[in-house]
Image (cartoon, helix red, strand yellow):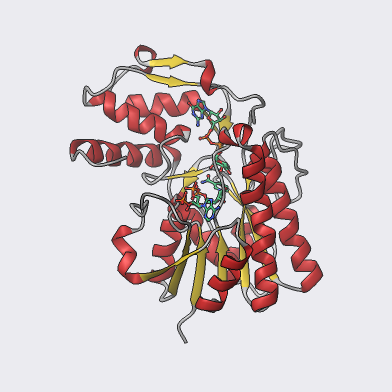
Amino acid sequence: MTKRALITGITGQDGSYLAEFLLSQGYEVFGLVRRTSTVNFNRIEHIQDQITLIPGDMLDQTSLQLALQQCEPQEVYNLAAQSFVQTSWTQPVFTGDVTALGVTRLLDAIRHVDPAIRFYQASSSEMFGKVREVPQRETTPFYPRSPYGVAKVYGHWITINYRESYNLHATSGILFNHESPRRGIEFVTRKVTYNVAKIKLGMADEIRLGNLDSRRDWGFAGDYVRAMWLMLQQDEPDDYVISTGQTHAVQELVEVAFDYVGLDWHDYVKQDPRFMRPAEVDLLVGDSSKAGKQLGWEPQVSFEELIHMMIDADLKILQAGERA
Ligand code: NAP
Ligand code: F7E
């Protein structure tokens, strides 16, 4: 029997990779899409004839219930969120409504429509924030440092609460930063690779960045969506950290990117207080040995390979005159 999966956030970076992956596994794929005045399906337009899009919004309980009734999925992947940390300080209530309460709306709809549905929640390393332990693992206490991080802690715990209260197969993946050529242009990796490509092509002459000292554990999004799927294939729901175990400063990201195109970053990078955060997460590095043992998951793409892949893709986009 063909399995059916519903992905919220299918138009986002991870949603597009997960949709491709589930199609390759023979799934019938449904995606929840919210109404916007301009269609923004550029990450999924190459597979749009193979998936079914259902209108709905994480802010609207009825739309979630109707979406579940329409597609009758065996698996639901909740990737929808206001996911940009910086925006969460200027839109803290909206971020909480979508990224935190949205999880409860969806879990409650599942409980009423079909409690046998397996549920994946996109938890985040931002929950560790001001880290209590290095490296961070499933048992590390949370100390979020942004309204986004706080909202994700809520989403994480409501997932566990619905698992324990209603016996749902509800799993949470605590994913560390993962990037790709499809990453939103506002996140630091893509901002750097896109602007380095522009500088290389003579289309820009500087990049303005915030804190160069913070450290992140950056992996490839294509590897990480495979982990999401593996989690829902387990007999029992659980929580898993997904990470590379390597950490790099933003400055190292800048160095690797400029080195790749044969330029010296000192000549182009300007620090700009507009991109500093009211509270920073200084160091993230994950320990995903539980996922290694129980899911057989390992990352395949190194940090350097990832940055090179993103620059190659951005050079192509710019040379073709396409949208970022
Ligand atoms: P993304 O590119 O920002 O995508 C977010 C998705 O959520 C988009 O499809 C967006 O739709 C949708 N969305 C936002 N508000 C919505 C609403 N009210 N109703 C319905 N859909 C809504 O994020 P991503 O990088 O793919 O991340 C996927 C998930 O993993 C997010 O929950 C994120 O917080 C979490 N996460 C990401 C990382 C990472 O490093 N990428 C790490 C840990 C956790 P539109 O296209 O209409 O805006
Ligand atoms: O920032 C620093 C910034 O915005 C990374 C989301 O997917 O991963 C992501 O959150 C670091 C921070 O990602 C700029 O201060 C310096 O220390 O790329 P980012 P993030 O905040 O780590 C987690 C796991 C998620 O869950 C989130 O959804 O880079 N930084 N200068 C900058 N960051 C940005 N965006 N822009 C700069 O100019």
- What residue is drawn where x is 70% and y is 63%? 238
Q: Quadrant of residue 68?
A: bottom right
- What residue is drawn where x is 45% and y is 51%? 12
User: Furthest residue to the front?
Assistant: 37
In depth, the one of 81 and 3 nearer the eye is: 81
Q: Please indicate whether residue 149 sits to the left or right of residue 24 in the image.
A: right
- What residue is drawn where x is 42% and y is 57%? 17
Q: Position of residue 122 (x, y in %)?
A: 60, 54
Residue 136 seen = no
Q: Please indicate whether residue 237 sits to the left or right of residue 206 in the image.
A: right
User: Furthest residue to the bottom?
Assistant: 1
In depth, the one of 63 and 222 nearer the eye is: 63
Is 271 drawn above or below residue 92 in the view shown? above
Q: Please indicate whether residue 222 sits to the left or right of residue 201 in the image.
A: right
In depth, the one of 198 and 221 nearer the eye is: 198
Q: Position of residue 306 (x, y in %)?
A: 40, 41
Is 291 drawn above or below residue 307 in the view shown? below
User: Furthest residue to the left?
Assistant: 320
- What residue is drawn where x is 43% and y is 19%? 208
Q: Quadrant of residue 199?
A: top left
Q: Position of residue 115 (x, y in %)?
A: 68, 77
| Quadrant (top left/top right/bottom left/bottom right) for the C terminus | top left
Q: Position of residue 34 (x, y in %)?
A: 48, 57
User: Furthest residue to the top?
Assistant: 267
Q: Quadrant of residue 189?
A: top left
Residue 194 seen = yes
